[in-house]
């Protein structure tokens, strides 16, 4: 897709440049120039449509990911748990959190995430218990 996008951009830019400089008309009939321009514009349009659709999906996933991250941050504000990652792809949400102690109730956070996806999503949470130990030096508070 990248190759076709670059090829279309080069063809379109070259055609427009040659038309403005008058070089496109040298040795060609106006119908030939019009047909070539039409073919190049159609080629660029055929590339632009799926490119635009893909860009929209990427933008939608990124926006949803930001919203889910905000919800998860609100869910874990004053706990020993931290967010390692949030990943959204289509209607699949993956959350990775790590920490120690009990997790706060997640019902409200799940309902909010569900609302972001209009009730149509698959939520996977990976919960990693973390144990912290001092492996060198003196622990804080010890003489």
Image (tube, rainbow, N blue to C red):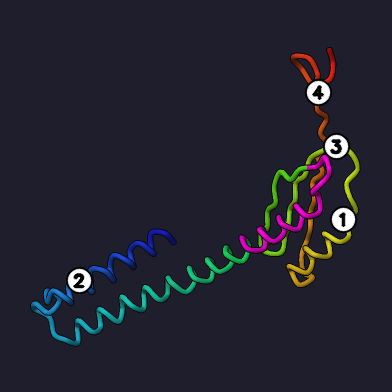
Q: Position of residue 133 (x, y in %)?
A: 81, 23
Residue with the mark numbered 3 = 100
Judging from the image, what secondary structure is the residue with disc 3 in? loop
Q: Is residue 14 left or right of residue 41?
A: left
* Mark 3 → mark 2, Cα distance in angstroms: 64 Å
The residue shown at (42%, 75%) is 46
The residue shown at (87%, 55%) is 106
Residue with the mark numbered 2 = 17
Are discs 4 and 1 less than 8 Å apart at CB? Answer: no
69 w.r.t. 128: above or below: below
* Mark 3 → mark 4, Cα distance in angstroms: 12 Å
Return the disc, 3 or 2, that comes first in the chain's sequence: 2
Residue 79 sits inside the magenta stretch: yes
What stretch of residues is rendered in magenta? Answer: 62-81
Q: Is residue 130 left or right of residue 92?
A: right
Are discs 3 and 2 less than 8 Å apart at CB? Answer: no
Return the disc, 4 or 1, that comes first in the chain's sequence: 1
Mark 4 neighbour class, 10 Å CA radius: few under 14, some 14 to 19, many 20 or more = few
* Mark 4 → mark 1, Cα distance in angstroms: 28 Å
The residue shown at (37%, 73%) is 44
81 w.r.t. 133: above or below: below
Q: Position of residue 75 (x, y in %)?
A: 81, 53
Residue with the mark numbered 1 = 106
Residue with the mark numbered 4 = 133
Return the disc, 2 or 4, that comes first in the chain's sequence: 2
Q: Quadrant of the C terminus?
A: top right
Query: Could you say which quadrant of the image residue 92 lies in?
Result: bottom right
């Amino acid at each position: 897709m990248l190759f076709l996008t670059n090829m279309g951009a080069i063809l379109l830019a070259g055609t427009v440049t040659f038309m403005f400089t008058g070089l496109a008309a040298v040795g060609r009939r106006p119908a030939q120039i019009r047909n070539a321009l039409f073919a190049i514009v159609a080629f660029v349009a055929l590339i632009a449509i799926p490119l635009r659709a893909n860009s929209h999906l990427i933008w939608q996933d990124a926006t949803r990911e930001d919203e889910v991250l905000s919800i998860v941050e609100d869910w874990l504000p004053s706990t020993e748990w931290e967010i390692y990652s949030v990943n959204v792809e289509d209607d699949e949400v993956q959350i990775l959190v790590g920490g120690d102690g009990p997790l706060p109730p997640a019902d409200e956070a799940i309902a909010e995430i569900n609302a972001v996806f209009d009730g149509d999503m698959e939520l996977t949470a990976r919960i990693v218990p973390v144990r912290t130990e001092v492996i060198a030096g003196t622990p804080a508070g010890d003489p």
